[in-house]
Amino acid sequence: MVLTRAFKETVKARAQKDPGFRAALLSDAVELLLEGDVETGKAVLRDFINATIGFEVLAGQVDMPAKSLMRMFGPKGNPRADNLFNVIHALQKDSGIHLAVAAA
């Protein structure tokens, strides 16, 4: 699914002004990954990254090339667990959002 520029700009604008929206995006992405919906989880994480820190800054924080991160979260990307968790850790640290897992 191709996203229009207006959609990406809308998400970025809302994420920049609404901390609850930012937290929900990151939380939803991780929850989708944990539920096994990896494709949607990666897409939401990609939206979160684009709307907040950006791939260039994230690349410096996780010591990976930005292009590798973009491929990792692209439709055909297949992130290794260690890379995925390093990214989630960096996103939590940068955003000030702390996620915790609770048994249901």
Image (tube, helix red, strand yellow):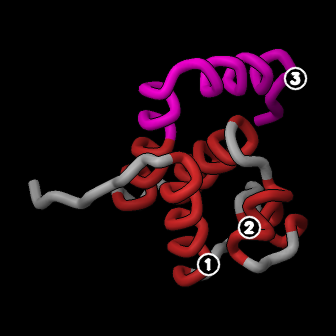
- Name the N-terminal-most of marks 3 and 1: 3
Discs 2, 1 touching: Cβ within 8 Å: yes
Placement of 18 over or under 3, stated as above or below: above
Instruction: Say few, some or many: other residues with alpha carbon within 10 Å of mark 1 (under 14 / 14 to 19 / 20 or more).
Output: some
Q: Quadrant of the C terminus?
A: bottom left
Is 24 part of what is drawn in magenta?
Answer: yes
Image check: 82 left or right of 35? Answer: right
- Name the N-terminal-most of marks 3 and 2: 3
- Along the line of sight, which residue is nearer the eye, 6 or 39? 6
- Along the line of sight, which residue is nearer the eye, 1 or 29? 29
Give the numbered dot on residue 83. 1
Determine the residue positioned at 80% across, 55% down. 55
Q: Which residues are magenta?
A: 1-25
Name the kind of residue labelled 3 in the image.
Arg
Give the numbered dot on residue 72. 2
Give the numbered dot on residue 5. 3
Closer to us: mark 2 or mark 1? 1
